[in-house]
Structure formats: structure tokens, C-alpha cells
């Protein structure tokens, strides 16, 4: 595994986790909370998956591939959900999720 690819993936995971937490908090303040329920759930799942993947990479775990696969799938799902909403925080989250998914795919390659 290439050190630059590893560092980029860890950064993408941590950036994505932060974007997801920001999005979830902002969604909770939206007028139509019922419409944002799936977004908040996926934001929280994605943030956790991203932090797990980053932690596994940082400790050179034997489970990095599985953690990155979970992160990749969760990021893609979160990006799709956030992409449905016009709010700036949702759009920023969708972009961070796509970048993280791409980084995790590169790690898996």
C-alpha cells in the first residue's frame, strides 16, 4: 500500500465524517424534519463508518479492506440521499461522501 494513498484516504474519511456530522446537525434544524429523517440516519452511519475506516488504517489493522468496503458502500448511499436535497449542507456532504468513496476504492485497488 502506497503511503500517499493511505494518507489521502484517511484524510478523506475524516473530512467526510466531519461533513456528515455537520449535515446531520443542520438537517435536524430543517423545517420539514420528516423529509430529512433518512438523511440524518445515513449521515450518522456514514460518519461512524468513516471514522472506523480511518482508525483501522491508522493502526494498520488486518481488517482495513473490510472497513474500507463498508465505508465505500455507506458513503455511496449517503451521497445519493444527500444529493436529493438542495440544502448547501446536504450538497457539501454528498461531495465529501463521493470523494471518500473514491479514496476507499483506491485503497481497495
Image: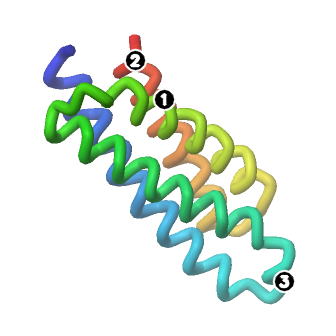
Residue under label 3: 32
Residue shown at 31%/34% (left/top)? 9
Q: Considering only vertical position in the picture, is 92 above or below 34?
A: above
Q: Is residue 22 left or right of residue 86?
A: left
Residue shown at 42%/29% (left/top)? 66
Q: Nearer the viewer, mark 1 or mark 3?
A: 1
Tag 3, which secondary structure?
loop
Residue under label 2: 108
Tag 2, which secondary structure?
helix
Q: Nearer the viewer, mark 3 or mark 2?
A: 2
Separation (CA) of disc 1 from disc 2: 8 Å
On the image, which quarter does residue 26 sit in? bottom right
Pointer 1: residues within 10 angstroms few (<14), some, or many (20+)? some
Tag 1, which secondary structure?
helix
Pointer 3: residues within 10 angstroms few (<14), some, or many (20+)? few
Q: Position of residue 105 (x, y in %)?
A: 46, 22
Q: Are marks 1 and 2 in contact (CB under 8 Å)?
A: yes
Q: Are marks 1 and 3 in contact (CB under 8 Å)?
A: no
Separation (CA) of disc 3 from disc 2: 38 Å
Q: Position of residue 11 (x, y in %)?
A: 28, 44
**Upstream in the sequence, badge 3 or badge 2?**
3
**Upstream in the sequence, badge 1 or badge 3?**
3
Q: Considering only vertical position in the picture, is 33 above or below 66?
A: below
Residue shown at 66%/65% (left/top)? 41
Q: Quarter of the image containing the N terminus?
A: top left
Farthest residue to the top: give it: 109
**Upstream in the sequence, badge 1 or badge 2?**
1
Q: Is residue 69 left or right of residue 55?
A: right
Residue under label 1: 69
Amino acid at each position: 500500500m502506497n503511503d500517499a494513498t493511505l494518507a489521502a484516504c484517511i484524510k478523506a474519511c475524516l473530512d467526510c465524517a466531519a461533513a456528515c456530522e455537520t449535515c446531520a446537525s443542520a438537517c435536524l434544524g430543517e423545517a420539514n424534519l420528516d423529509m430529512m429523517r433518512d438523511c440524518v440516519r445515513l449521515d450518522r452511519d456514514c460518519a461512524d463508518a468513516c471514522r472506523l475506516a480511518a482508525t483501522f488504517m491508522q493502526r494498520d489493522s488486518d481488517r482495513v479492506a473490510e472497513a474500507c468496503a463498508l465505508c465505500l458502500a455507506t458513503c455511496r448511499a449517503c451521497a445519493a440521499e444527500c444529493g436529493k436535497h438542495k440544502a448547501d449542507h446536504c450538497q457539501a456532504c454528498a461531495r465529501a461522501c463521493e470523494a471518500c468513496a473514491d479514496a476507499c476504492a483506491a485503497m481497495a485497488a
